[in-house]
Image: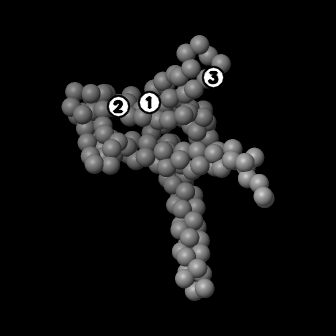
């Protein structure tokens, strides 16, 4: 009985930890959104999540070499929108263009990388919630 209770406590702690991280992440994400002046391209912070994804050109987003610059490329934040009714379903929107990546201040580049990772962290929670809701019709008490 004790091990079941311990597992439940551990699971509860992990879930509450994720929720705290998510709330903290949103506060920081909004702050960076404003610091990068992304409101010039996205009317409100909440509208940011209408995009399917946000990518980066000019620097790596892989965990092995996070933030590593790609010489000769341009640093740019690209948002991917999706319109199921349009002829061309997917649309890329530049949220920020910063010039040749090797000329961009390292702190700014790192802030942009952090912004995208934080966006993806929140977006993953939203996706989880979406699919959880979609599964509800399949949950039966049989």
Near mark 2 (Cα within 10 A), the count class, few <14, some 14-19 or many ≥20, is some
Q: Could you tell which of marks 3 and 2 lies nearer the N-terminus?
A: 2
Q: Residue at x 75, y 46 (%)?
A: 137
Q: Which residue is drawn at 45% across and 39% down?
A: 36
Q: Vertically, is 68 above or below 9? A: above
Quarter placement of the N terminus: bottom right
Say if mark 3 contacts mark 1, CB within 8 Å: no
Q: Could you tell which of marks 3 and 1 lies nearer the N-terminus?
A: 1
Near mark 3 (Cα within 10 A), the count class, few <14, some 14-19 or many ≥20, is few
* Front position in the image: 42 or 86: 86
Looking at this rendering, what residue extends furthest in the bottom direction? Answer: 2
Left or right of 50? Residue 69 is: left
Q: How far apart are marks 3 and 1 (CA)?
A: 19 Å
Q: Quadrant of residue 68?
A: top left
Label 1 belongs to which residue? 78
Near mark 1 (Cα within 10 A), the count class, few <14, some 14-19 or many ≥20, is some
Could you say which disc has been placed on residue 10 in the image?
none
Q: Where is residue 109 in the image (x, y as percent from the top left)?
A: 33, 41
Q: Where is residue 88 in the image (x, y as percent from the top left)?
A: 55, 15
Left or right of 14? Residue 142 is: right
Quarter placement of the C terminus: bottom right
Residue 107: tell me if it is visible: no
Secondary structure category for the residue under label 2: strand
Q: Distance between the residues labelled 3 and 2?
A: 25 Å
Label 3 belongs to which residue? 84
Q: Could you tell which of marks 1 and 2 lies nearer the N-terminus?
A: 2
Secondary structure category for the residue under label 1: strand
Say if mark 3 contacts mark 2, CB within 8 Å: no
Q: Where is residue 46 in the image (x, y as percent from the top left)?
A: 62, 41
Q: Position of residue 111 (x, y in %)?
A: 38, 45
Label 2 belongs to which residue? 57
Say if mark 1 contacts mark 2, CB within 8 Å: yes
């Amino acid at each position: 009985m004790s091990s079941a209770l311990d597992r439940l406590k551990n699971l509860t702690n992990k879930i509450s930890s994720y929720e705290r991280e998510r709330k903290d992440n949103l506060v920081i994400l909004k702050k960076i959104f404003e610091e990068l002046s992304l409101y010039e391209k996205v009317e409100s912070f909440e509208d940011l999540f209408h995009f399917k994804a946000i990518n980066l050109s000019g620097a790596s987003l892989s965990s092995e070499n996070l933030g590593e610059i790609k010489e000769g490329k341009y640093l740019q934040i690209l948002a991917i929108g999706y319109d199921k009714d349009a002829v061309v379903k997917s649309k890329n929107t530049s949220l920020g263009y910063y010039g040749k990546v090797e000329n961009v201040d390292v702190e700014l580049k790192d802030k942009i990388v952090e912004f995208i990772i934080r966006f993806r962290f929140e977006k993953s929670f939203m996706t989880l919630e979406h699919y959880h809701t979609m599964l509800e019709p399949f949950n039966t008490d049989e």
